[in-house]
Amino acid sequence: MLITGGSGFLGKRLALALKDRYEIVLGARNNKQNALASQITGCTVIPLDVTSIESVRDAFRRYEPNLVIHAAATKFVDLAERQPLECIDVNVVGSENVVRVSIDSQAETVIGISTDKAAPPVRNTYGLSKALMERTFCSLNGTAETRFLCVRYGNVAWSTGSVLPIWKRMHESSGVIRTTGPEMRRFFFSVDEAVALVETAIDRSDEFAGRVLCREMRAAKIQDVLDTWIEMRGGSWERVEGRPGERTDEILIGDLELPYTRALEIGGLRHFVIAFNDRAPRPMASGLSTASAERLTPEEIKGLIAAEPSEE
Ligand SMILES: NC(=O)c1ccc[n+]([C@@H]2O[C@H](COP(=O)([O-])OP(=O)(O)OC[C@H]3O[C@@H](n4cnc5c(N)ncnc54)[C@H](OP(=O)(O)O)[C@@H]3O)[C@@H](O)[C@H]2O)c1
């Protein structure tokens, strides 16, 4: 199995969770992060730049992966607003390269990792780039031997560049957390929940090929997460100016997607399958956003904050 973006937060955790089932190769650009990923996971880690089709070809030629988890991405919303070309290069052209080489190499299954920011109405360049990845994967499924599908989810607690590690740095340096939106609501997953969703996609890739698989997520108001943080760790917070591309609420399944989305139970949990161009016989009645989603309890918020990974 090849995990693009394998040195990232998700990639390392996926490798640890799956290394007993698969021979795993992780690929990313930064050699320092690659060395760390190799040390943490014990897996083979190779230099890989998905923006270069030759780099992707080299990896496939050497390791002939049957299963590819495409997690490589640039995912900073405000950076993508200011530097859209880099975001398009990595998330759109990079995904295109992975798709092309996977088809040429007759890889069996390719799973793209997407985000709630790809759900309509898309608000930022990052979301647009991931929406294009979803569409590319789903449209090309069935055109060749390779099976393509995606998973889509919201914020993963403690992931690179997310609020908790940023707050931790601010808290350690000044005791004051500067936040752009206490009134914002966000979906939160633990990294184990994200890994479990990818595992479901792997195990049922035949059934969900050409689709985007989501799982019900619960949400929290940033103010509640802040208050819990301060209760647990002390300090204070202050409001700073918002960043480009941000929105108050996130959407996991947009209203436009409802006719094409069905809900199903997997392992006692509500999942959703979006098929962009196939109407669902029993479509979902209402979309899923952080405004309508069930809230995380104070204890669950505490659990997410306490689950600080040791290697970050
Ligand atoms: N974290 C979240 O809250 C969240 C939520 C929903 C979806 N996702 C998606 O989940 C995936 C993994 O996210 P993450 O949290 O693990 O992010 P991350 O920690 O930032 O990892 C991103 C990985 O992609 C690699 N990468 C970036 N550009 C690359 C390129 N051109 N070629 C090859 N590798 C490249 C990075 O390493 P180098 O920079 O060294 O190459 C890194 O290994 C992403 O696709 C993201 O969009 C994340």
Image (cartoon, rainbow, N blue to C red):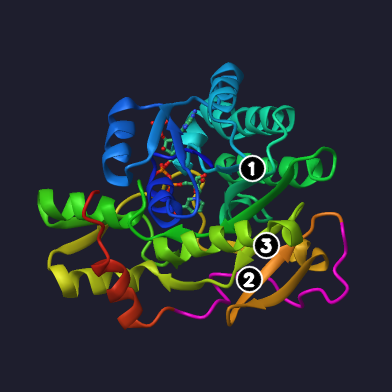
Q: Residues within 10 Å of mark 2 (few under 14, many from 20)?
A: many
Quadrant position of residue 267: bottom right
Name which residue type carries label 2.
Leu
Q: Is residue 27 above or below residue 312?
A: above
Camera-near label (2 vs 3) is: 3
Image point 87% across, 59% down: which residue? 278
Look at the image and tell me whether residue 107 can be seen: yes
Q: CA distance from mark 2 to mark 1?
A: 19 Å
Cα separation between marks 3 and 1: 27 Å
Look at the numbered discs 2 and 1 and tell me whether their residues touch, using CB distance below 8 Å: no
Q: Which residue is mark 3?
A: 204
Locate residue 203 relative to residue 189 in the image: left or right. right
The residue that disc 2 covers is 288
Q: Position of residue 258 (x, y in %)?
A: 77, 67
**Dot label at residue 128:** 1
Q: Nearer the viewer, residue 255 or 21?
A: 21
Type of residue at label 3? Arg
Query: Which span is picked out in magenta?
Result: 278-295
Quarter of the view holding residue 76:
top left
Task: Identify residue type, mark 1.
Answer: Leu
Q: Main secondary structure of the magenta part?
A: loop
**Whole-number angstrom distance, CA of label 2 to CA of label 3:** 23 Å
